[in-house]
Image (spheres, rainbow, N blue to C red):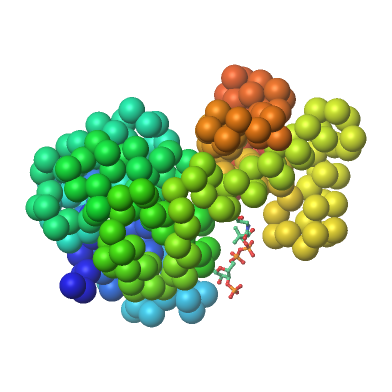
């Protein structure tokens, strides 16, 4: 089956990137966002990013309206989900909320619809177990910024069928991405490797090895990374990094994943990185 129409549930940073990428690759998209303010923000952000993509010659479209015309917005999750041949969930990284949503989607969508989650750290097998279609539940983990980053981790839960994995790989390719299939283990591959790097940079800062700017400059220039680890943590969101580290630490039980206390304190203080204007570095409206 060729997938031409998808539903995306949740349009925070990742969800809106998925909506934009799917629409700019010719798919029809039903986007669900229950929060009016968030929905308007997502619409404006997608327009701005599509205009940038066109101006840079990355998108084949005459104008932003051509891409945005492929997106229908819904305030109701089920109303959007039932319109999609394939559903991608991208709500906040809250296990209870995701389990509840998967139960609802399972009850509302036709049995053949695949339910995918963009979770960065919650078990796909656990989400699948909340449904009556575990073989058609899969992880589709994109990277931020979605329109630019190439890979997608396709996460195979314990019960995910080969057909579901293959359909998901095809969908990722259709969206211009390169799929990599991984097993359902905490943090999958990228976050399992990336989060200890970010955490260690926070420990280095906490211990006074160097200031944040020096740590980032050294890692950028010394390792040829596009962003230093603290700048990248601000970009991802310090709350998101902390929550992934907690999952890695809790589930793998290895002390090497223990979150740096400085990272926890910063989240306690509301210093969440770019989105709050302050993290390891300070940000203005333009980032
Ligand atoms: N649409 C399509 N293409 C676009 C675009 C858009 N809206 N905006 C920019 N581009 C293209 C540009 O044309 C450019 O392409 P070329 O290199 O071919 O010229 C490229 O994207 C880079 O664009 P910019 O020059 O504007 O951006 P930059 O060079 O300043 O890089 C960055 C910005 C891509 C974010 C870079 O700093 C980077 O790669 N940072 C690291 C990001 C990262 O590691 N992300 C993963 C985080 S982990 C995660 O997401 C998972 C999780 O679960 C936490």
Q: Quadrant of residue 1?
A: bottom left
Rendering coords of residue 29 (x, y %): 24, 60
The answer to whether residue 151 of the structure is visible from this angle is yes
Image point (37%, 49%), residue name: 157
| Residue appearing at x 82%, y 35% in the figure | 204
Lateral position of residue 35 relative to residue 15, left or right: left
Q: Is residue 33 above or below residue 272?
A: below
Compared with 105, 239 (above or below) is above
**Observer-nearest residue: 230 or 60?**
230
- What residue do we see at 60% from left, 25% from top? 267
**Given the current orientation, which residue lies at the most extreme front position?**
158
**x and y, in percent, of residue 227 in the image:** 70, 54
Along the viewing direction, whichever of 26 and 184 lies nearer the viewer: 184
State the residue at coordinates (31%, 54%).
160
23 up-or-down from 139: above or below: below
Residue 246, picture quadrant: top right
Q: Position of residue 76 (x, y in %)?
A: 17, 40
Residue 42 in view of the camera: no
């Amino acid at each position: 089956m060729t997938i031409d129409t998808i539903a995306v549930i949740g349009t925070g940073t990742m969800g809106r990137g998925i909506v934009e990428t799917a629409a700019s690759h010719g798919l029809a998209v039903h986007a669900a966002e229950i929060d009016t303010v968030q929905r308007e923000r997502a619409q404006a952000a997608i327009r701005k990013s599509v205009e940038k993509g066109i101006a840079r010659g990355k998108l084949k479209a005459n104008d932003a309206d051509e891409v945005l015309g492929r997106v229908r917005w819904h305030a109701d999750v089920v109303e959007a989900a039932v319109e999609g041949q394939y559903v991608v969930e991208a709500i906040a990284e809250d296990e209870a909320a995701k389990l509840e949503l998967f139960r609802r989607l399972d009850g509302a969508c036709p049995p053949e619809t695949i339910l995918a989650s963009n979770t960065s750290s919650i078990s796909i097998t656990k989400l699948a177990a909340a449904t009556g279609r575990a073989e058609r539940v899969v992880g589709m983990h994109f990277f931020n910024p979605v329109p630019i980053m190439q890979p997608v981790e396709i996460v195979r839960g314990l019960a995910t069928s080969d057909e579901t994995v293959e359909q998901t790989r095809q969908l990722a390719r259709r969206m211009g991405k390169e799929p990599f299939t991984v097993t359902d283990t905490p943090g999958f591959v990228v976050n399992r490797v990336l989060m200890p790097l970010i955490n260690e940079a926070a420990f280095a800062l906490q211990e006074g090895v160097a200031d944040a700017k020096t740590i980032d400059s050294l890692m950028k220039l010394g390792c040829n990374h596009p962003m230093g680890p603290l700048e990248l943590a601000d970009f991802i969101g310090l709350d998101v990094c902390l929550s992934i580290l907690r999952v890695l630490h809790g589930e793998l039980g290895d002390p090497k994943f223990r979150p740096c206390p400085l990272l926890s304190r910063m989240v306690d203080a509301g210093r969440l990185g770019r989105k709050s204007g302050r993290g390891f570095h300070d940000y203005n409206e333009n980032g």
